[in-house]
Amino acid sequence: MVELKRSSSGQSKFRSINSIILKFPHFKEGLKEIKDVFEQFDEDSNGTIDRDELKKCVKKLHFHVKDEEVNDLFDSCDVDDKEGIQFNEFIVLLCLLYLLIDSSSSSDNTSKILSPELEATFNTIVEAFLFLDKNGDGKLHKKDVLKALNDECPCEKSPSHVTRTRFREMDWNRSGKVSFRQFLFAFLDWVGIDTDDENHTTKRETKCNNNLT
């Protein structure tokens, strides 16, 4: 889905890590409206969206997808396996859903709820991923990310342990490769999207490790 964005829009508009960081306030502002959508469909106000609530949400937002696709997205984004999508997880799910629908190139599938500002924010986040995806295979590779983090100003390189930490925050299973979903979860942490769960990153890593065993 992300690579379809690359083919339709050409190369990433970003030219440096700093140009992405400078956009952080824009990203945060652009994602604010999702909070209202989340609260609207969290019918029991327990801070999570369950499967039934998510299906109602998808239908209300006029995303034309199959139930099994909704269930797959739910399972992919429910990182703590509590059968409930929290706010940060909902942002990731909504972005993935937007890309899924947008990649179908069908006007009938276009959501009537997502604002142009939110769609532009999602597109810009994809641009940030594409900037780091140097070889265009849809994965972020450790050596490319570490190089990008230090190439902005050689005289002011981040300490090596800092750049390695940033990559570890994305690379949950320590494979040396990062998917767009993994990138998006870490990216929201960097931007500073509010969440009630301070241990979210640890839970993501735990789920990933459990899936490997």
Image (cartoon, rainbow, N blue to C red):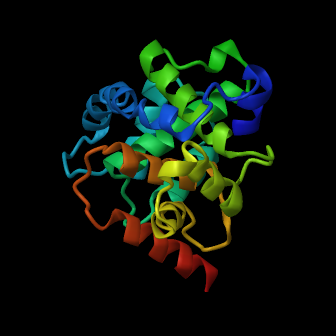
Nearer-the-camera pick, 112 or 145: 145
Direction from residue 37 to residue 205 in the image, left or right: right
Residue name at image x 56 percent, y 45 percent:
70
Residue name at image x 70 percent, y 54 percent:
144
Residue at the far left in the pictured view: 45
**Quarter that holds the C terminus:** bottom right
- Residue 91 visible here: yes
Nearer-the-camera pick, 84 or 105: 105
Q: Measured from the top left, where is residue 143 in percent x and y?
A: 69, 61
Direction from residue 109 to residue 50 in the image, left or right: left
Q: Is residue 2 above or below residue 135?
A: above
Picture quadrant of residue 29:
top left
Q: Measured from the top left, where is residue 57 in percent x and y?
A: 41, 34
Residue at the far bottom in the pictured view: 213
Q: Measured from the top left, where is residue 46 in percent x and y?
A: 20, 52
Nearer-the-camera pick, 79 or 191: 191
- Residue 115 visible here: no
Picture quadrant of residue 133:
top right
Q: Measured from the top left, where is residue 32 in percent x and y?
A: 30, 29
Residue name at image x 52 percent, y 29 percent:
122
- The mark total stands at 0
Residue name at image x 53 percent, y 34 percent:
125
**Quarter that holds the N terminus:** top right
